[in-house]
Amino acid sequence: MLRTFERCVFLTFLLTATVCAGATPNHMESIAVSPDGKFIAVTYEKNHTRFIYKIAVDSGIASRLTDAKTGEESSPSFSADGKQIAYSYWPGKGEHFRIVIQNIDGSNSHTWSPSDADDFRPLFSPDTKTIIFARSRYYGNYSPIASPSYHAWDFYAANLDGTNMRQLTRESFYMVSAASVSSDGKNMAVVTEGLDTPEQIAIYSLDHPEKPAQSLRPHVPRGADPKNPIFNCPNYMPDGKSILFMAATNGRHGYDYDVYRLDLGTGAVDRLTNGNGYATDLRVFADGKTAAFLKWRSDWRSTPVESSLYLLDVQTHTATSLKVTGLD
């Protein structure tokens, strides 16, 4: 069974290369929530195309948020004022993934200059002056029995026009999750894994990001691997005092990827869902009252092939499926 990061890389990137033989059913992945909580952006894959849609939370009706006709889009992110989106874009064979920023209405779309690396998972700073993103400098495998994946990860920041590019971390991680920035813009939470170090939730000060200010490995009951716990999708809560994250536990039919809340001051952990099965892409709404995530259905080979969107009431711990229409 693949570990969390390997499967997240599979879902986010390697589906474009059709890792498993045969057709891949249409599915949603890599979601984001608008600041006003009215829309959820998703990457939707259909017939080997991957474009970004927005889904109205009150109705579940989806519509295209971008207008590209070729290439593949992923990892959308809303600016704090709700006026812009950023996402990763792959023009096609022989090209690298690039960051694109545009207005919500599709105007003023601009792509950063090419480089010799692949740029993913853009995230606006709370003041909307900076983009923080993950960069991979190696696509391949370190073992002949492993599938090729993106590796040699670090985080960078730049102005919205791509100028003033600066490197935040210099650890060349084996794998990383999407990052979350605290509402005051001072800290970044991300799950990291090194070639010789296990997964951890790392908290970085964006003023001094050279090394993590905190390295956390919270205990969850019935963890999938007590010595090497599996974490993903850290999200700062609005007060900056706790984070929501996903962790793998031993379930009835394989691993369950449930949602937990971690108090950064005390280390206390609360479980918010139970028995999710394979789930990904946890995102917290700006008010902290609701979270969204994807649950996946697997085929006979235990490969995740179809996703459903769920809304989680953080206070009552109630998860409800949101029926989505209009994806085409």
Image (cartoon, rainbow, N blue to C red):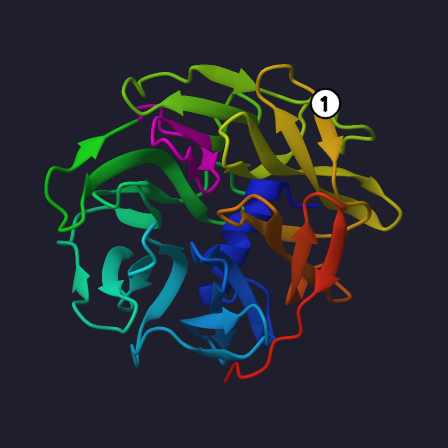
**Residue topped by disc 1:** 219
For the magenta stretch, what is the residue range?
169-189
Where is residue 80 drawn, in percent x and y? Answer: 34, 49
Q: Residue at x 25, y 56 (%)?
A: 98
Nearer to me, 120 or 319:
319
As helix, strand or loop, the secondary structure at mark 1 comes to loop
Q: Quadrant of the N terminus?
A: top right
Q: Is residue 175 magenta?
A: yes
Nearer to me, 195 or 289:
289
Where is residue 198 drawn, in percent x and y? Answer: 57, 24
Task: Determine which quarter of the picture holds residue 112.
Answer: bottom left
Where is residue 313 drawn, in percent x and y? Answer: 69, 50
Predominant secondary structure, magenta span: loop
Left or right: 231 in relation to 298: left
> Where 125 sits versus 303, above or below?
above
Where is residue 59 drawn, in percent x and y? Answer: 59, 76
Q: Residue at x 59, y 65 (%)?
A: 20
Residue type at mark 1? His
Is any atom of residue 14 visible in this view?
Answer: yes
> Where 169 sits versus 309, above or below?
above
Left or right: 207 in relation to 202: left
> Where 54 sits versus 111, above or below?
below
Task: Determine which quarter of the picture holds residue 13.
Answer: bottom left
Q: Residue at x 26, y 36 (%)?
A: 156
Q: Residue at x 72, y 22 (%)?
A: 219
Left or right: 186 in relation to 44: left
Is any atom of residue 95 visible in this view?
Answer: no
